[in-house]
Structures are given as structure tokens and as C-alpha cells.
Amino acid sequence: MTDTTPTPAPLPAPAPARAQSPLLRIARNFAEDRLAVLGLLLFLAVVVLAFAAPWIAPQNPYDLAQLDIMDGGLPPGEASFSGMTYWLGTDQQGRDMLSAILYGLRISLVVALVSLACAITIGVVAGMAAAWFGGRVDSLIMRVVDLQLSFPSILVALILLALFGRGVDKVIIALVIVQWAYYARTVRSSAIVERRKDYIEAARCLALSHRRIMFRHLLPNCVPPLIVVATVQIAQAIALEATLSFLGVGVPITEPSLGLLIANGYDYLLSGRYWVSVFPGIALLITIVAINLVGDRLRDIFNPRLQK
Amino acid sequence: MIVYLLRRVGQSILAVVTMAVLVFIGVYAIGNPVDILVSPEASQAEIRATIERLGLDKPLWEQFLTFAGNALRGDLGTSFVYGRPAVEIILQRLPATFELAFVALLISVLIGIPLGVYAGLKPDSLGGRSVMAGSILGFSLPNFWQGMILILIFAVWLGWLPAGGRGPTVELLGIPVSFLTPQGWAYLLLPALNLALFKMALVIRLARANTREVCLQDYIKFARAKGLSPRRIVFVHVMKNIMIPIVTVLGLELGSMIAFAIVTETVFAWPGMGKLLIDSINLLDRPVIVAYLMLTVVIIVTINLAVDILYSILDPRVRLSEVKG
């Protein structure tokens, strides 16, 4: 939207001729929306907290020696038997919920990020191949994509896990299978537009290899929509993993993600011990909201129809 | 039109067959079908009888034909737990799930469209921005947790509504339903709201985006120039044009609603087929899992087909481009 309006900030005096780098322009555009910046900061904070969990968590929630059963089921902030203050309360085994959340967040994020990386790789290769080679390759790949996208992702993932059994690796595989098609479709549609442009023609005239043109010339120009889809999908992946774990087909009890923590708290909910499932849920919510805020802004930036 | 129709029906049949093959491979080729299809407590004689009945000693393609033939006749195995045909058990649970999904769909449309149109007309106002913020929240709230919070607030803290179950039902044409009695609604409201919230967020965003685009069109400017009242422009000119994409997406989302009902039914102990699926997974009642899968595939493919055909009637450009391409 701001493309044609001159930027209010004066350009630095030397080298005014040099065009603003696209990355910088996107960053400026992004920063205009304070909510999106807040989302980005929140997400970074969540990532740092999750990966620093072993150093900053008050206790290791899965080291049984550190748990005190006498502290079980304490409400948030209540004086405890062992003298430690549990700001978010404890579960039945006397596990500090804050620590459990930090550790759980780590598993949730790792599962989401690893599946994201694999799904993008597969999706990009398939989508590029479909767009570049066209014809039979294209229709075969897109048939598979269409078929898969016509079924709700939760159903596909649930069935896969029902057949394979639970486990972190299996959840990741299921998430990859569910998600790759979104990337394939996105990359294909933008690659089909890009491949008709002159720079691709030029690259072909240089007799560069297919692979080089596809991944060095074509791919970088298909990145913006891919980023938008990736932000949406990573939020989806986190939510989907949590849901699968809640339903009891996701991660095993030995590696509890946020979803599993919430599921454990479900049994205590009706007796009023809300904190066991409410706080992990809030952590999950903050993470997903943060990602969605960023994704929303990116979508607006990259949407050509809103750029007047 | 007929070319398009035939093509689309052919694609749907292909989709069902592909899924049937995948399910078949999952059950028969990867795992040991005897483990999957015979109850763990079965005796040697029973195991032998099942192997013979399903033809597990025959080559794989012949087995597939048997599987497909049985499936076509509605025989997808017998539940270990209930000792009755799996399809029958699922069909019994089907009305509960459908009732839930339809009520949820209705809630999401009736609340989502007005909010979305409002946010689209006034994108920069405080109200419009709060609606959008709310829709981000609706998108981000994990379904199952949101359901638990509803239970916590309305059932545990306030005590206004029951925490789960379906309560008493009345028969309508021989099908038990909840929506005819106030008591039924008390049980139906929370699960329906839970299932609706995510779709409501989707409807809000769709309505907003489409309203914003439609408002830039010349016919809206012309309508304004004619001096039509804003009310008439919104309700006639804008609404008509945003409805096609919304109806299409909602039609397609009906399938995902049936799938997401798995989560809602588990949280609220709603006795639909989604809860049955989770119970069956936990009890390793695999014939029911297979039957659920095949039935859901058929339902979703049918819904998609119906939506596509409706869409092609509403918007002729779709079928023309398909036939050409």
C-alpha cells in the first residue's frame, strides 16, 4: 500500500541512487503494524524460553528425584511443603507447571519446526517439478496434491497415527505428509507465473541446467507466498500436534508436549483444578497467536490486490 | 455441462478408489491383517476361519478384490468390541455428529457473516480492528483447549450448562435428535459453539476480505452515485457478491467440520462417530477404524462433488475453464 508514497524518513545523503533492498523494504513495511512486531517479538521470546528450558526452568519436571509428591495438586502461588513457590501450581505428581510448560513448549516447537523443514523441502521440489516440466508430471503431482487437500488434515494425521502408533518421529512424519501438499501447490502456482518471464528465458538461453534454473533463478522469486504459507502452516502444525497428543495418538508420555500436558489436566478440570490444563493452553495460545499475527501482516504485505 | 459433470464424478470415484487402495495397503500389506482384523482374544479356529473368509492366503490383488467387493456390499468387518458389523455401529452414531456439525455451521454463518461484513466496511475503525483481532484469536485457539475452557467457565464455574454427554433426545422420523427440546439445546450448545468458533473466524475473514474487494468495484461506486441508501448497498449489492465464495468455502468446510467433530466429541463426550473413532483407536477395534475411514471418505468426497457442481451452476466460468484445460 505504501509503495508509491514517498517514505517520510529522509534517505541518507550519500549514495541515494542505490535502490532500497527488497528485504529492507519488507522489514519497514512490516514494522508499520505494531501488533505484528509484537507478535514477532513474542514468538522470538517463546523460542528462546523453550530452548533455554533446561537452564531457566525452576526444576527438571521429568527428574523424579526433584519432584515432591507432597506438593501435588497445589494451586498457583500457594505455600508448598518443600518451601518452593510454584507460580503456576503443580500437577498430581507435584510437578512444577511452569517447568513442565517450558519443557513441553520445546517438544512442541521441535516437532513443528522439523516437520516444517521436511514438508517445505518436499513441497518445493514437487511444486517446482510440476511447474517446470508441466504436462504429465504436472498433472500427476497435482492430482496427488488435490486428492490430499480434499481431506481434512486432522483426519489424515489421525488415521496415519492410528495405524503407525504413537511417537515423536511418527508425529513428525504424519505432519510432513499432511503439510507438503500446501507448499507444493503454492510453489507451483507462483512458479508457473514466474517461468514465463524474461529472466528465465535469458537463463535458458545461457544453456544452464534445469536444476540450476529451477533452484537458483526460479525459486528465489517464488519465496514470498511460500513465507506466508509457512507462517500459517507452522501455527497449524503446532495446533495439530497438540490436538493429536490430546487425543492420545501423538507424542508418548515420556516426551510430553503442551497438548499432552493439557490432556493430563483434563481429568482434574471438573474438580476445579483448572491450572493443570489452563496454563499450558495459554502458552500454546500465545505461541500460535504470535505466529498468526506475523503471518497476517506478511499476507497483507505480499498481497498485490491490496497494494493500490 | 454434462462433460464437466461426468469428469467431476469420475474424479470423485477415483478419489474413493485411491483411498480404498491406501487403506487396504495400510491394513493388509504393511501390517499383519490377522492382527488387525482378528480380535486378540480369538482362538486358533476363529483365526483360521477369518483367514479363510477374508481369503488372506490368496494373492494380494485377489484379496483387494474381495475387500472391495465386501466394501461395496457394505461389509467392512465386524467390531471386536461390540460384535456387530462396523458399518452398522457407525451409522448409528452418524446423526449425532451431523446434528452437531450442522448446528455449528449455522452458528458460524449467523455470527460470522455480519461481523465480517462490518469489519470489511470499516477496516480501520476500532470495531473492525477488534473483530479482526478476535478472529485471529478464534483461529489460534486450539479446538480442544477452547472446548475445555468453555466447560470450565459454563459448567464448572457458572454451572449453567452440562459439561458433556448428549442428554435426553427425542425421535424425529426415527432418528434421535437434540435440537427440538430446550434440554437438548443445553447439551448441544457448548459442543456446537466449540466446533463453530474456528469456522466463525474463517467466515469473518472471508467476509471481510471479500467485502473489501467488492467495495472497490465499479458497481458499488455506481450504486453510491445513484444515491442508494448505504443499507441497500450493503444488503443487496455487497452481500450478493460475497456469498458465492463464502458458500463454496463453507460447503468444503463441512467435511472438515465432520473431521474436527472428532475433537469436540472427545472433549464433550458427545456420542457421535468421532468419539467412536477415538474409542476404537484406544481399544484397537480396527474394523471400526477402517469402516469409519471409508465412510468418511465417501461423505467428504460426496460433499466436495456437490459443492463443485453447485458452484459450476452459480459461476459458469469454472466449468468452461475445466473443460478447456
Image (cartoon, coloured by chain):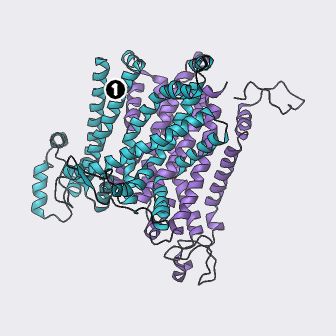
Chain colours: A purple, B cyan
- Asked whether, in this view, residue A57 is left or right of residue A171, the answer is right
Badge 1 amino acid: Ile
Few, some or many residues within 10 Å of mark 1 (<14, 14–19, 20+): some
State the image coordinates of residue B139 (x, y, percent, origin top left). 53, 46
Q: Which part of the image, by quadrant, shows the N terminus of chain A?
A: top right
- Occupied quadrant, residue B313: top left
Chain letter of the residue beneath label 1 in the structure image: B
Q: In x, y percent, where is residue B93?
A: 26, 52
Q: Which residue is drawn at 30% across and 35% down?
A: B302
Residue B229 visible in this rendered orientation of the protein = yes
Residue B179 left/right relative to A94: left
Q: Quadrant of residue A296?
A: top right
Horizontal side of B106 relative to A299 (left or right) equals: left
Residue lying furthest right: A13
Q: Which residue is drawn at 16% across and 59% down?
A: B83
At x 85% / y 26%, what residue is drawn? A16
Which residue is depicted at the point 68% across and 45% down?
A: A35
The image position of residue B195, as x and y in percent, is 43, 49
Q: Position of residue B167 (x, y in %)?
A: 31, 60
Q: Can residue B31 be seen in this view?
A: no
